[in-house]
Image (tube, rainbow, N blue to C red):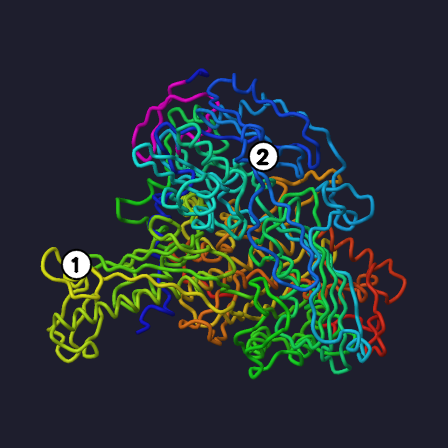
């Protein structure tokens, strides 16, 4: 077997220790090492955004990072968004209310990016939401309802279609 | 009775999807699981001299390396999924894909060997150690060159690359042409790309040594046929094979393809190795190993009288079917049939040639060939309107089938083997709604011209019609059961890829049984829960599977009412079923909860009434005589920058008729998402092949999908003509959003550019999709070079007796 390294990181508030090969992707470590399979993998080259997690509060693509680089990092995945089991984060609630997901595969990564975005821009306009969202690919929804969900949770009035 | 059907209900499946709990294929983990990776051909066309896995077997963690030679009798070409419809004069050469290439590889990415190891990393490490000796052959890439004499052969045992030839028609085209005031012909090219579901494909297989049960998790849209097919291939009883289509991250058609090589091999490997085996496709594999749609080339003519009435259409086209043709003729027959659109076409002569090429297999992708047909017809009408000096809306008005024309029989054969027949429809109201909402009259009456003169803006408007054959048979089934808890359990055989079946089917059942939607748990895509069905395709979830759920729920309702009548001492017609209880309408205090009735229907002691069944459960099936026909109008307003050829989409409107609507939120979601895929098709997405059959843009860095800044909010409006083919009156809406998008943009962009003042702009015709800025620039340059009013190269006005308008005389405007 190849050489492995011991790493320790915090995921969703819990300290986790893992033994990893240096080449193991963070996305694979989260999914298959820690069983946090809510983080999805769509392209493995950093374009689709499905694997996005928060790293010290900032969105990163976990398919472009080696797990060893995450030594000491504080990560949040989609499993850590809801305040408690059985409840939803306000953005998750808004996604449901606006039908902002269909197959739901890209959704966890989008939620993570937009949670960080809303922290920076609590009251964005349509254009800013679209810019923030444009780093993610969604093949089902055509994006419009995701934009609405963000504006809804941001407290903006429900936008009328132009 | 319809508290839920037709309501905007939030989805039952969302909490699991939003919190990461939903199980997708790559989330399936089993103790002792091994991982597979495939050696794939680097060449598009080559003779296989040798494939040797012995060195790879020595690599760390490798448990097995399998080549075609190792498969023995298990190696055989896949089944033909859809046999050719019975059409006189049709030719079809069946050549289906193989599990691992043995003698020849026929497209880049075709699998040659599979490596199974302790981890995916180790399996991929060992791929390079598999020795592959290939003798490259000239590749068949271009559709027309493929049919030229002396072209290299994709299948050596055929004497050409012709995969199929299908002539269909009605009426007398020659007479129509001779009688016409205008005959107009053009060559059209319509290219489509890859479905690019964000989740790639995957298969996990495991034989439980205790039960002997083989369970296969598969990202398929057709779990029941997969189970039946694999049971036959593996020589197992169907009851020993259990297929689960878990949550699936988008399907769009390619996941209905059966049987992919990986689907055939992973279960076989799990049985042979006695360990669970997992294979998850990566994105670069997806571009080569998952089926696609691609190009067609149409040479089409339309014959009209001077008032713009269609006398006939003739269309001869080539269809790229890729290296194999397991899906039969579904895609080109959809093109052939859908071309007729919502119009009265007295004479139609159509023939196509499907062509083998050294490219991945072509099977349906959302729209499934309908786009190509709609594009040809809509563009012919646009060009004819210009020649005749007619408004583009008016020429459509004059040719629509009338409400009294239904059911309308077309006299040609559709993909479901029945005569192409429109069940119901009323096309004009959708068009007039679109005309009013877009402000068409004002726009063509001066608004467009004013914007150009006063603001220097080049605006164009497009407005097109389409029909969509939906909801074809043969059948789907459902089982509905009242649990002792009072909750309702529903199972059906179709798979779900995000359409909202867990909610739409629950709405249908909740109405019948008087419960809340969230109290109805729907299972789809698990053959142990429901083992009969065909799958999710052709927009048939609502029009077939939901109807089966409805029928089963009605039976359960009758059982509940009969039992409650006995228990409450009332007649069944005196009872109401609501709020999860059955009550005497006149005396609501006399009531029983559904759960209590379920318990009483399944007693542990005592006598059971002869002829009754235990429990409150029923199974029902539904199969329509033929498919329904949805329809609609798409309209858009664009602004083109003649310097950069960037197209801004200012408005997009869909007026849609899919019969009765189960859930408007889900329907609008399908439309918005469908239009987004159509925008990708129209402007961004093209698979680019070199002369050697290599795909040059096999990544999301190079193959561009539309993002949130490219897709506008789609406005929607509805017309409802219920389908007479099912009791819910639904038609299906899965593909309507994508089908006419290319045609709408071609019209709008051409409209904008014709008035742009670019040299030769009045001659510019858009006869192809997709339209990158680069390609638009080339088209404008070609138009500038054209000497006379002959249109673009390859295009010619043939036999026009009289031309009501000189295209060169138009300095712009709406093309009227």
* SS for dot 1: loop
Q: Is residue A24 magenta?
A: yes
**Residue B724: mark:** none
In this view, B808 is above or below B786: below
Quadrant in which the N terminus of chain A is drawn: top left
* SS for dot 2: loop
What is the x, y in percent for residue B444?
Answer: 68, 75
Q: What segment carries the magenta color?
A: A5-31
Q: Nearer the viewer, residue B238 or B169?
A: B238
The answer to whether one can see residue B668 in this image is yes
Residue at far right of view: B787
Q: Residue at x 15, y 59 (%)?
A: B599
As measured in the structure, the alpha-carbon distance from the residue carrying label 2 to the one carrying label 1 is 52 Å
> Tag 2, which chain?
B
| Circle 2 residues within 10 Å: few <14, some 14–19, many ≥20 | many
| Circle 1 residues within 10 Å: few <14, some 14–19, many ≥20 | some
> Tag 1, which chain?
B
In this view, B194 is above or below B403: above
Quadrant of the rendered structure where residue B519 is?
A: bottom left
Q: Is residue B79 left or right of residue B12?
A: right
Disc count in the image?
2
Q: Nearer the viewer, residue B27 or B61?
A: B61
Q: Earlier in the sequence, mark 2 or mark 1?
A: 2
Q: Residue at x 51, y 18 (%)?
A: B59
What is the x, y in percent for residue A10?
Answer: 34, 30
Q: Is residue B595 magenta?
A: no
What is the x, y in percent for residue B46?
Answer: 70, 33
Pointer 2 and pointer 1: residues touching (CB < 8 Å)? no
| Residue placed under numbered mark 1 in the picture | B602
| Residue placed under numbered mark 2 in the picture | B100
């Amino acid at each position: 077997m190849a050489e492995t390294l011991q790493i320790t990181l915090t995921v969703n508030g819990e300290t986790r220790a893992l033994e990893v090969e240096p080449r193991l992707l963070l996305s694979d470590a989260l999914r298959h090492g820690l069983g946090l399979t809510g983080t999805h993998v769509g392209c493995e080259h950093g374009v689709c955004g499905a694997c996005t997690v928060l790293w010290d509060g900032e969105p990163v693509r976990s398919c472009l990072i080696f797990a060893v680089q995450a030594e000491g990092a504080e990560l949040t995945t989609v499993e850590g968004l809801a305040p408690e089991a059985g409840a939803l984060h306000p953005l998750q609630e808004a996604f449901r209310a606006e039908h902002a997901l269909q197959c739901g595969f890209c959704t966890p990564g989008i939620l993570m990016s937009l949670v960080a975005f809303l922290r920076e821009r609590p009251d964005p306009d349509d254009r800013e939401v679209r810019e923030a969202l444009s780093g993610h690919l969604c093949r089902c929804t055509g994006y419009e309802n995701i934009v609405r969900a963000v504006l809804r949770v941001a407290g903006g009035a429900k936008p009328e279609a132009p | 009775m319809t508290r839920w059907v037709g309501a905007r209900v939030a989805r039952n499946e969302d909490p699991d999807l939003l919190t990461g709990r939903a199980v997708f294929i790559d989330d399936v983990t089993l103790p002792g699981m091994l991982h597979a990776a495939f050696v794939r051909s680097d060449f598009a066309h080559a003779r296989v001299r040798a494939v040797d896995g012995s060195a790879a077997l020595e690599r760390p963690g490798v448990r097995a390396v399998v080549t075609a030679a190792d498969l023995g009798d298990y190696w055989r070409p896949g089944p033909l999924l859809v046999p050719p419809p019975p059409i006189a004069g049709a030719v079809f050469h069946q050549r289906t894909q193989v599990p691992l290439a043995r003698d020849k590889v026929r497209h880049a990415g075709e699998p040659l060997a599979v490596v199974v190891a302790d981890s995916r990393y180790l399996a991929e490490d060992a791929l390079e150690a598999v020795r592959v000796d290939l003798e490259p052959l000239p590749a068949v890439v271009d559709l027309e060159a493929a049919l030229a004499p002396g072209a290299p052969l994709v299948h050596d045992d055929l004497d050409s690359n012709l995969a199929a030839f299908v002539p269909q028609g009605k009426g007398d085209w020659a007479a129509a042409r001779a009688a016409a005031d205008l005959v107009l012909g053009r060559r059209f090219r319509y290219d489509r790309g890859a479905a690019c579901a964000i989740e790639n494909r995957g298969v996990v297989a495991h034989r439980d040594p205790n039960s002997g049960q083989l369970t296969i998790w598969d990202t398929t849209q057709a779990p029941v046929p997969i189970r039946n097919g694999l049971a036959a291939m593996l020589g197992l009883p169907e009851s020993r094979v259990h297929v689960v289509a878990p949550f699936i991250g988008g399907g769009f058609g390619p996941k209905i393809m059966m049987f992919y090589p990986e689907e055939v091999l992973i279960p076989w490997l799990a049985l042979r190795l006695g360990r669970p085996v997992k294979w998850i496709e990566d994105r670069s594999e997806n571009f080569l190993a998952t089926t696609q749609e691609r190009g067609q080339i149409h040479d089409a003519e339309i014959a009209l009288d001077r008032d713009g009435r269609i006398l006939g259409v003739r269309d001869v086209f080539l269809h790229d079917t890729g290296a194999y043709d397991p899906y039969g003729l579904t895609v080109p027959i959809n093109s052939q049939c859908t071309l007729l659109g919502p119009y009265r076409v007295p004479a139609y002569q159509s023939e196509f040639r499907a062509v083998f090429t050294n490219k991945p297999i072509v099977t349906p992708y959302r729209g499934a060939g309908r786009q190509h047909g709609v594009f040809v017809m809509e563009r012919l009408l646009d060009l004819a309107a210009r020649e005749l000096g007619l408004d583009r809306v008016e020429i459509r008005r004059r040719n629509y089938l009338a409400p009294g024309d239904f059911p309308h029989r077309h006299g040609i054969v559709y993909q479901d083997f029945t005569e192409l027949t429109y069940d119901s429809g009323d096309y004009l109201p959708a068009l007039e709604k679109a005309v009013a909402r877009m402000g068409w009259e004002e726009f063509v009456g001066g608004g467009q011209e004013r914007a150009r003169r006063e603001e220097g803006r080049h605006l164009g408007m497009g407005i097109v019609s389409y029909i969509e054959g939906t909801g074809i048979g043969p059948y789907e089934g459902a089982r509905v059961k009242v649990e002792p808890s009072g909750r309702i359990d529903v199972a059906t055989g179709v798979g779900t890829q995000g359409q909202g079946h867990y909610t739409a089917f629950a709405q249908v059942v909740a109405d019948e049984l008087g419960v809340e939607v969230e109290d109805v748990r729907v299972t789809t895509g698990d053959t142990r829960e429901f083992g009969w069905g065909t799958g999710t395709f052709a927009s048939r979830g609502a029009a077939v599977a939901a109807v089966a759920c409805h029928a089963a729920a009605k039976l359960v309702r009758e059982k509940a009412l009969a039992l409650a009548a006995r228990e409450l001492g009332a007649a069944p017609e005196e009872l109401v079923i609501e709020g999860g209880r059955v009550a005497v309408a006149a005396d609501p205090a006399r009531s029983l909860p559904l759960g209590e009735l379920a318990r009483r229907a399944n007693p542990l002691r005592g006598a059971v009434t002869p002829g009754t069944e235990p429990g409150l459960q029923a199974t029902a099936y539904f199969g329509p005589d033929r498919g329904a026909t949805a329809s609609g109008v798409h309209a858009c307003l664009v602004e083109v920058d003649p310097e950069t050829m960037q197209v801004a989409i200012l408005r997009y409107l869909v007026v849609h008729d899919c019969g009765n609507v189960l859930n408007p939120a889900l329907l609008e979601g399908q439309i918005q998402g469908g239009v987004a895929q159509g925008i990708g098709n129209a402007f961004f997405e093209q698979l680019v092949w070199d002369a050697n059959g290599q795909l040059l843009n096999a990544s999301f860095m190079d193959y561009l999908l539309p993002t949130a800044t490219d897709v506008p909010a789609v406005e929607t409006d509805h017309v409802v003509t219920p389908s007479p083919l099912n009791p819910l009156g639904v038609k299906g809406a899965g593909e309507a959003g994508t089908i006419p998008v290319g045609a709408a943009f071609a019209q709008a962009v051409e409209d904008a550019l014709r008035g742009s003042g670019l040299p030769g702009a009045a001659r510019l015709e858009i006869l192809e999709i997709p339209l990158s800025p680069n390609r638009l620039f080339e088209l404008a340059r070609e138009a500038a070079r054209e000497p006379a009013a002959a249109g673009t190269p390859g295009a010619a006005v043939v036999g026009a007796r009289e031309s009501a308008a000189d295209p060169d005389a138009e300095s712009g405007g709406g093309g009227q």
